[in-house]
Image (cartoon, helix red, strand yellow):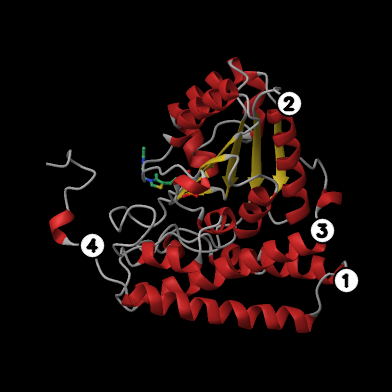
Amino acid sequence: MPTDDRSLTPERVLDAYRTVLRARALDDRRFVLNRAGKLAFIISPRGHEVAQVAAITALEPGRDRFCLYYRNFAAALACGFTPEELMLSAFARASDPSSGGRQTPGNFGSRRRGVIIGSSTVGPQIPKAAGIGLALKWRGEGGLCFVSFGEGATSQGDFHEGMNFAAIHRCPVIFFCENNHWAISVPQRLQVAGPGVAERAGAYGIPGVRVSGDDFFEVYRVVAQAASRARAGEGPTLIEADVLRLQSHSTDDDQRAYRDADELAAEAARDPIPRMRDALIDRGWLTPEGDRRVGEEVSREVERATEAAEAAPDPDPASLARHVYADG
Ligand SMILES: Cc1ncc(C[n+]2csc(CCOP(=O)(O)OP(=O)(O)O)c2C)c(N)n1
């Protein structure tokens, strides 16, 4: 596996950029559909997209396992979920591949993509990932488990249990904390004691790395390095990606009620997507005209995905107890 950005071809990065734009455009559409009363509830990845897609780009969907959390909409796209599949989940349709419309959207699951479905509870994917990492180590096929969560989750016991277990058994796990500095309305200073999350790795004797989540190339680099360590049998790494929460916690929340208006405006001006676009233009990998074309293609994809998902049938009420009780 690559350990630096030299192996990132322009094609791979442009593909990742398209995924980032797809995530943003789909999410914007989901927001409008929610306000129109067509979708019950969604959690936005706005501000996290670049970090999420960069991380998954450094890994191997199909070989690796992914324990994603509810804000990982862009990561799910990078793992191979299609726009239509994610819209089916948003509309809670029968053909939603994650749960047949049973879970809240944001609980991503796909056996063939190695994405292990979670729940909306904060934290339990973390010890689960440690166990999956141990199983992958025993299998000896070089796969690893990537697990993501917010900084709020690091004050749960699950975080410490998962880190401790994975460190003791040198499990091939990447702990990826997306620190947006807010857990709903609770700021980091009331949630995370000490200077931050990355420092906590030292207590378990594993590397802890802090990275700017708006820098595609840096996030790719640190995740690729953590992957190399994991595949070489050197154990887990904790990565803390500093990101912005550019949208309220969920569509049921309004962050203007508890966040400073100037701070929100300043963060909106630091949107990571234009930064990624500019980096690609600077490298000569993208032109403004090419950017416009990708944007238009993505808009058409969103149209098609929305129409298909809206027209898809709801789950059959007779199947309500399926996967809850044994059939028959
Ligand atoms: C165990 C548990 N406690 C509380 C909640 C309610 N809850 C849902 S999301 C959330 C905030 C988590 O914040 P963070 O981990 O920082 O992730 P973010 O949503 O900011 O990405 C809380 C408290 C929950 N779902 N599960």
Residue at (75, 61) in percent of width and height: 13
- Amino acid marked by disc 1: Gly
Q: Quadrant of residue 264?
A: bottom right
Front of the two marks 4 and 1? 4
Which residue is tagged 2? 232
Front of the two marks 2 and 1? 2
Q: Quadrant of residue 93?
A: bottom left
Compared with 238, 310 (above or below) is: below
Which residue is tagged 1? 284
First in residue order: circle 2 vs circle 1: 2
Dot 2 alpha-carbon crowd within 10 angstroms: few under 14, some 14 to 19, many 20 or more: few
- Mark 3 → mark 2, Cα distance in angstroms: 24 Å
The disc label shown at residue 9, or none:
3
Compared with 248, 66 (above or below) is: above
- Mark 4 → mark 2, Cα distance in angstroms: 45 Å
Which residue is tagged 4? 315
Residue at (58, 45) in percent of width and height: 62
Position of residue 15 measured from the top left corner of the image (x, y, whole percent)? 69, 64
- Amino acid marked by disc 2: Ala
- Mark 2 → mark 1, Cα distance in angstroms: 35 Å
First in residue order: circle 4 vs circle 1: 1
Position of residue 328 measured from the top left corner of the image (x, y, whole percent)? 11, 41
Q: Would you say the residues marked 3 and 1 are in contact, meaning their CB atoms lie under 8 Å apart? A: no
Position of residue 218 measured from the top left corner of the image (x, y, whole percent)? 77, 49
- Mark 4 → mark 3, Cα distance in angstroms: 42 Å
Residue 163 seen in render: no
Q: How many marks?
A: 4
First in residue order: circle 3 vs circle 2: 3
Residue at (36, 72) in percent of width and height: 34
